[in-house]
Image (tube, rainbow, N blue to C red):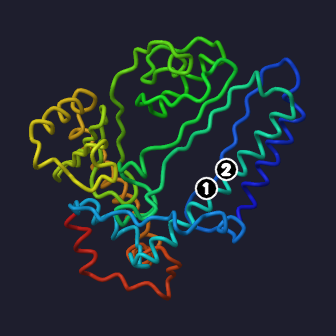
Amino acid sequence: VHAGDWRNADRAANWLRENAKGEKPFWLYLGLSLPHPAFQTSRYYLRMIDDSGVTVPPMDQYDHPVMRYQRLVKNWEHGYSDEMVRLVRRVYFAMIAETDAIVGHVLTALRESGAEDSTYVIFISDHGENAMELRLWYKMNHYESSARIPMIIAGPDVRQGVVNESLVSLIDIFPTLMDMARWPKPDGLDGHSLMPELLGQPSTRPDWVFSEYHDTACNTGSFMVRRGPWKYIAYPGYEPMLFNLNEDPDEIRNLASQMPDKVREMDQLLRSIVDYEAVDAKVKAYDRASFAAWRDEMKKQGKYEVVMAQIFSGYDGVNAKTAQPWTPEDEARIERW
């Protein structure tokens, strides 16, 4: 099914066999679309997933309005029966199995090149997948299934078989690569090299990580800070969420209303990192200005109502013939915004 990823993996493997043998340092980046929506797999990989091991995640005890909005605009119309949830998750796990096979294919070529013992390998992702946890799919939120990613690092001086519990972020990859290459890091980086952790040495990294999101399927900014087991998510204009991931790894119990002191503590930490209300206001002003300019251009071209009808009818194969007409009532909602 995912022939493009296999073609790129073949290119990477062939490049390693031909170029990794010499003394000259090399860099190879391989980006896969797996595992990623659309959820597609083959029976070969689907058979690898034991149905009995595919669980149905528990329901959220508090349905946050920002998450209700996400379900609406993500346009999931296929239901939440146990059968449907298990099917989605089993297909996703099969896609992970194929990802694993592709990674193995490339690592085999590295081993055959003779450069395995002198090469750093980093396996990492840009985001996760809700995969029907909390009745959500895709990404675009700060739940663990979306925001937490795998990170596996191997190399000539990296400790083997060690699980490090430090909180790290994607911004830490660049300074880590600089240290691996024995290259001086530029000043002013927000990220911290992972080499101390990889070598078993003391680290000076902060005890928190931060993330923010303003894009698709979000009706307000989302700002997350994580420290120890505590995760705090602020949504300007809406109530925050607070989770203890040690006690609630499924993130189904929002503790914000029950623990106001912890909310104040985490909110103070978040505000020490970013003025999130000011940032959110700036983003929303940009959104409105950008939309207004786009609307003017679409109206000049006579396309505005047709395009808006398709956007608001969803994105599952909707076209001009199947979209619901754009009405004056719809436009009035845009004007109010």
Task: Pick whichever, 33 or 265, lies toward us.
Answer: 265
Who's the residue at 57% across and 60% down the image?
Answer: 93
Task: Return the x and y of residue 53 as percentages of the image width and height.
Answer: 51, 63
Q: Residue 100's mark?
A: 2
Where the C terminus falls, by quadrant?
A: bottom left
Contact (Cβ within 8 Å) of mark 1 with mark 2: yes
Task: Return the x and y of residue 14 as percentages of the image width and height.
Answer: 86, 42
Q: How many marks?
A: 2
* Residue 116 found in image quarter: top right
- Asked which secondary structure carries label 2, the reply is helix
The residue to which callout 1 is attached is 96
Who's the residue at 55% across and 18% down the image?
Answer: 195
* Residue 167 found in image quarter: top left
Who's the residue at 17% across and 30% down the image?
Answer: 268
Q: Residue 323's mark?
A: none
As measured in the structure, the alpha-carbon distance from the residue carrying label 1 to the one carrying label 2 is 6 Å
Who's the residue at 71% across and 62% down the image?
Answer: 2
Amino acid of disc 1? Ile
